Amino acid sequence: MSSPKSILHGGIHYPLTRALQAERSLTKDMLMYPMFISDDPEALDAISSLPGQYRIGTNKLVEFMNPLIKKGLKSVIIFGVPLKEGVKDKTGSRADDPEGPTILAVRLLRKTFPDLFVACDVCLCEYTSHGHCGILREDGTLNNDLSNKRLAEVAVNYAKAGAQCVAPSDMMDGRIRSIKQGLMDSGLAHKVMLISYSAKFAGNWYGPFRDAANSAPAFGDRRCYQLPPNARGLARRAIKRDMEEGADCIMVKPGMPYLDIVRDAAEIAADYPISVYQVSGEYSMLYHASKAGVFDLKSIVMETMTDFIRAGATLVLTYYTPDILTWLDEEQQ
Ligand SMILES: NCC(=O)CCC(=O)O
Ligand SMILES: [Zn+2]
Ligand SMILES: [Zn+2]
């Protein structure tokens, strides 16, 4: 009979000794809740592709937020969703409409919940008639320079409205530099965190979001500006480039299928906070699998959080944030 040379089990027999194996564990500060703000002020529309999530109008927002703030919600990221006719145009000119959903929501949240950290996603796809994330040339390809100018304007206007963080998800080359410069020129750079969706991969994981945000491209796809799923090297280059251009935090997106990239980001950007976005497809997949009896929802979602943190994330964007806040409280008891 052979006996093992060492016994690892001795280190993990008790809940406490298992907990001690973690380098870090999840706290409420590490969760950022993505929220969809409708341009219908009275909206509280359930999003069928994201069960449990809503498109919320500004007149319904405070009531919606109150219980979340009580549970310890620390931060949100806002996605404006224009549903009215005639809002979309070729250049996304309504993205920073002072009466548009994003800016109205930022103002309201900052005024009502002074301790909440309010981030804005910065992109044009919700506001362009073609549904692409930047401004296009005649031939349908992206006009990178014009897009960057416009994205910087939008980001600065969100910051002027009170956003404490802007997170460009458009994937134009050079947008981090352009937005950072815009924030510096307007005297806001010292109080606005710039999170770069540095490693945002194209693919199938965003389906429910496009329905939620009404932002599916009218033609083509986003493979010419988001990263190919096979491109670890390109992701590493994008992370380095965005650090160089002035990002304050690096994001990897989607989350669960890209933990290797989260680890790469944590190593390449070792002195930066690292965020990971558990996207709509991940949310829905876990939701429906749990409904089908494959998983216990709480156990599987909390396991994915552990996975993100082990891989190196310090901030997790997830639609499960409200549930996780409740689950974290349950675990305290
Ligand atoms: N720019 C933000 C997204 O694309 C979100 C993706 C998702 O939740 O599927
Ligand atoms: Zn976009
Ligand atoms: Zn192409």
Image (cartoon, helix red, strand yellow):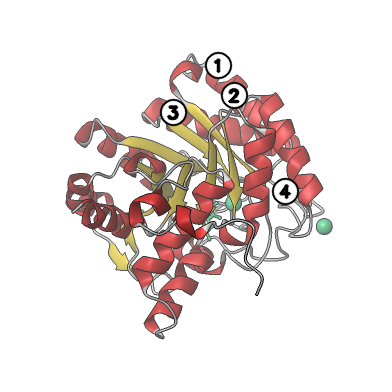
Quarter placement of the N terminus = bottom right
Q: Amino acid at mark 4?
A: Leu
Q: Would you name the residue on which mark 3 appears?
A: 159
Is residue 121 visible from the viewing direction of this image?
yes
Q: Residues within 10 Å of mark 4 (few under 14, many from 20)?
A: some
Give the x, y percent position of residue 322: 30, 56
Verify CB contact (< 8 Å) between mark 2 and mark 1: yes
Q: Amino acid at mark 1?
A: Met
Q: Which mark is residue 180?
A: 2
Q: Indicate which disc, 3 or 2, sits on the residue closer to the N terminus.
A: 3
Quarter placement of the C terminus = bottom left
The CA span between labels 3 and 2 is 11 Å
**Between 166 and 182, which is closer to the camera in this rendering?**
166
The CA span between labels 2 and 1 is 6 Å
Give the x, y percent position of residue 85: 44, 61
Of the residues tagged 4 and 2, which is closer to the observer?
2
**What residue is at 47 percent from the left and 48 percent from the top?**
21
**In screen coordinates, is 9 left or right of 203?**
left
Q: Which mark is residue 136?
A: 4
